[in-house]
Each structure stands twice: as C-alpha cells, then as structure tokens.
Amino acid sequence: MTLLKLVRTVAAALEEIKARDIEVLDVTKITTLFDRMIIASGDSTRQTRAIANNVAEKVKAAGGEVYGVEGEQAGEWILVDLGDVLVHVMQSAVRTHYNLEELWAEAKKLNKTISAARSRASAAPSSTGRRKAARVAPAAPAEPGSAPMTASAPEPPKKKTVKRRASEA
C-alpha cells in the first residue's frame, strides 16, 4: 500500500466515525521512525475507541498492516501504529493538554490529503441514506469525582502557611 493511499484510507476512516480536528503532519525531515503523523479528536472514550477500531479495520481491509494499537483500555489517547503512519486519536482535553501539534511544529501540515478524502466520502452515497449530522459540541464536563484529564496543566501544590505565636518570632 502506498503512503498516499494509506493516509487517505485513514482520513476516510476518521471522517466516517466523525473524528474532529484532523491534522496530517509530514514528519520525514524530523524523524526516520515514520513518515506521517495523523492527529484526531473524539468527544468520549467510546468514540475514541470506535475511531481507532475503524481506522484499524479500514486499513486491514485496504491491504495495509496494523503493527499495534496502544491505549484502548483508557480510551483517552489511542495510538494506532501503521508503520509509515502513526495515528493519535485523543479526547479534546487530552489533546489540548499534550499539544502534539506544538511539539511537532517543524512538521509540514498536509491537510490537502484530508480534503481529497472528504470529497470522495461526500461523493459516495451514505449507507443509512441520511445526511451527515452537524458537528457535535464538545462534551460537558465530567461528573464530580470522576477524575478526567483537564485541559490545563496541574496546579502546583499550595504552600502551607504556619501560624506562629508572637513568642516564637
């Protein structure tokens, strides 16, 4: 499978399960481990798992190979290793926290590949016969006590203030 076909297959699989904010990065000048990095967001652990599973299934169906999938248990950040392409499927808060786009800022963005996949997907008839739904707003904050990943860095521990008696000072 060619690199372009692999990227287009992944892009179509991401779009099919309504992944958001899809970025394709050309990292060939930065690392020799892989050629493309694709980053996408999902709104929930269920959606990120479904997106990652769909990517793996579509790549296998197209004749590609999936070398590994990591992070399916937690579902906040799932990595799909396709050899020349690395796919990160992340919940929005986790993606904001780790900010991979900034870490790989030297990489060239290749969103034209995504546009080509979108135009092919929109030209194909829908299996359900319904129109694509509008993008869903980000999920509401989690219930108290559920310990989700936050978009901001953890706060440093607060300093304890010790009250001293006037005689100790």
Image: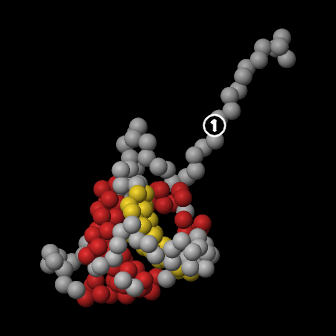
Give the quadrant of residue 157.
top right
Q: Locate residue 21, reporting x and y percent.
A: 43, 71
**Residue located farthest toward the top when viewing the structure as drawn:** 167
Camera-nearest residue between 38 and 68: 68
Camera-nearest residue between 30 and 15: 30
On screen, residue 85 versus residue 107, left or right, reads left
Please name the residue shown 57% across and 46% down the image: 154
Give the quadrant of residue 100.
bottom right
Estimate how packed mark 1 is, as few (under 14), some (14 to 19) or many (20 or more) residues with alpha carbons within 10 Å.
Answer: few
Give the vertical position of 138 relative to 109 (above or below). Answer: above
Q: Locate residue 168, reporting x and y percent.
A: 83, 13
Please name the residue shown 38% across and 80% down the image: 6
Please name the residue shown 51% across and 77% down the image: 35
Camera-nearest residue between 125 and 71: 71
Give the vertical position of 163 relative to 92 (above or below). Answer: above
Tally of numbered tags = 1
Camera-nearest residue between 25 and 61: 61
Query: Which colouring convention does the figure follow?
Result: secondary structure
Element under label 1?
loop
Q: Locate residue 136, reporting x and y percent.
A: 33, 65
Give the quadrant of residue 114.
bottom left
Please name the residue shown 31% across and 74% down the image: 59
Instruction: Name the residue tied to disc 1.
Output: 157
On screen, residue 73 versus residue 124, left or right, reads right
Give the vertical position of 49 relative to 27 (above or below). Answer: above
Which quadrant is the C terminus positioned in?
top right
On screen, residue 163 versus residue 56, left or right, reads right
Amino acid on which the number 1 mark rests in the picture: Pro
Which quadrant is the N terminus positioned in?
bottom left
Q: Is residue 30 visible?
A: yes
Q: Is residue 42 visible?
A: no
Q: Locate residue 48, reporting x and y percent.
A: 35, 60
